[in-house]
Image (spheres, rainbow, N blue to C red):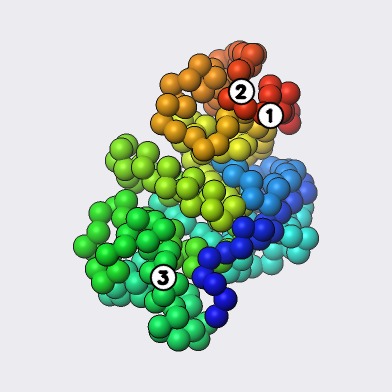
């Protein structure tokens, strides 16, 4: 077996061309996602931010290959997305671990399905469990772990498949505030190592600002991208970022974008912690 950890150079370019997605049946069918054009670079960390029901999960479902767009094309690494694939790892708000399998066997399950011998798959699973801070918990069952620990196992379980893209749908939405902050930091640490492309759905502005290279702000239904915001914050990022003047200014800007009845203030002049500078803030619409 190859080394269990994905190569840092793994490609994961995502390209959407005029993607629209209709959901529902018959006279109840409607357009949930409307004409989205998008190019996400390999290794980029992108957050989809928008109000409830704007189509974030629908768009993620199409990226996962679970939904077929009604119009437009959706490609990863120049190949059309025609269905689910192990090159795209999915993490949801609630874990999908097998309750009857120990942690190590949950993480190693994907390798078992590929016919990898137990010693090898356990070695790979142990390595990933250590990476997510769960060394020593290999023999536990999911029900013996806290919610944050279960999500750590879930992330390890997905990473073992060496995905080029991580698709995350509010993965920390069910966690308490402090655990959520810890998990955000953990995710950034893991991402810094693997540089997997990440598309992360959230309606939490702070979370998006803390995690992303780029925030795609969506309109209420039908979901369109109303702003493509590239963040100027240097990495690695620490907890102090969220109290910086630039963070607060961008938060105010995002809040106004999400509250469509309020006028959106012009972006303030930012003082980046490092390159790139204010000119990297781009606006799609
Ligand atoms: N299979 C379906 N059949 C009918 N309507 C659907 C289906 N899937 C999604 N919808 C509707 O499409 C719209 C977009 O849903 P989606 O879950 O993508 O939004 P969201 O932005 O992820 O919302 P939230 O943040 O609340 O999870 C919603 O109005 C939802 O009710």
Q: Position of residue 216 (x, y in %)?
A: 62, 36
**In-image side of 43 versus 205 (left or right):** right
Q: How crowded is mark 1: few (under 14 residues within 10 Å), some or many (20 or more)?
A: some
Helix, strand, or loop for circle 2?
loop
Secondary structure under tag 1 reads loop
Asked if one can make out residue 229 in the rendered structure from this viewpoint, the answer is no
Pick the quarter of the image with the N terminus: bottom right
Look at mark 1 in the image and give the residue it sits on.
276
Q: Residue 81 appears at what percent x and percent y?
A: 69, 63
Residue 242 appears in the figure: yes
Residue furthest left in the image: 144
Residue positioned 37% across, 39% down in the render: 181
Q: Mark 2 points at which residue?
A: 272
Horizontal side of residue 135 vs 90, given as left or right: left
Between 206 and 254, the one nearer to me in the picture: 206
**Mark 3, secondary structure of its residue:** helix
Q: Quadrant of the C terminus?
A: top right
Percent position of residue 154, x then y = 40, 61
Q: Kindly identify which numbered label has been placed on residue 162.
A: none
How far apart in space, not on screen, are marks 2 and 3 (Cα)? 39 Å
Disc 3: which residue: 125
Q: Does the residue labelled 2 lie within 8 Å of ligand 1?
A: no
Could you tell me if the residues under marks 2 and 3 are in contact, i.e. CB atoms within 8 Å? Answer: no
Q: Residue at x 32, y 37 (%)?
A: 177
Looking at marks 3 and 1 on the same chain, the residue that comes earlier in the sequence is marked by: 3
Q: Position of residue 85 (x, y in %)?
A: 61, 69
Distance in Å between CA atoms under marks 1 and 2: 7 Å
In the image, 103: left or right of 63? left
Image point 39% across, 56% down: which residue? 132
- The answer to whether the residues at label 1 and label 2 have Cβ atoms under 8 Å apart is yes
């Amino acid at each position: 077996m190859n080394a269990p950890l994905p190569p840092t150079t793994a490609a994961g370019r995502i390209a959407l061309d005029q993607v629209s997605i209709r959901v529902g049946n018959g006279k109840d069918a409607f357009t949930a996602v409307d004409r989205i054009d998008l190019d996400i670079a390999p290794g980029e960390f992108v957050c989809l931010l928008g109000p409830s029901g704007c189509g974030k999960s629908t768009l993620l479902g199409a990226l996962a290959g679970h939904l077929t767009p009604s119009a437009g094309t959706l490609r990863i690494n120049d190949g059309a997305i025609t269905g689910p694939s192990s090159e795209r790892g999915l993490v949801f708000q609630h874990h999908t671990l097998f309750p009857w399998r120990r942690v190590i066997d949950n993480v190693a399950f994907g390798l078992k399905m590929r016919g990898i011998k137990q010693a090898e798959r356990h070695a790979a699973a142990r390595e990933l469990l250590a990476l997510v801070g769960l060394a020593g918990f290999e023999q536990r069952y999911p029900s013996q772990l806290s919610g944050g620990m279960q999500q750590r196992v879930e992330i390890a379980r997905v990473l073992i498949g060496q995905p080029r893209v991580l698709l995350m749908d509010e993965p920390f939405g069910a966690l308490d505030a402090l655990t959520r902050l810890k998990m955000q930091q953990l995710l950034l640490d893991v991402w810094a190592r693997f540089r997997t492309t990440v598309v992360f759905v959230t309606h939490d502005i702070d979370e998006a600002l803390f995690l992303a290279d780029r925030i795609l702000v969506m309109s209420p239904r039908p979901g369109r991208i109303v702003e493509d915001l590239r963040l100027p914050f240097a990495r690695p990022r620490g907890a102090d970022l969220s109290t910086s003047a630039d963070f607060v200014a961008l938060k105010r800007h995002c809040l106004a974008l999400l509250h469509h009845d309020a006028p959106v203030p012009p972006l303030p002049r930012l003082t980046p912690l490092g390159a790139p500078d204010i000119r990297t803030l781009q606006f799609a619409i």
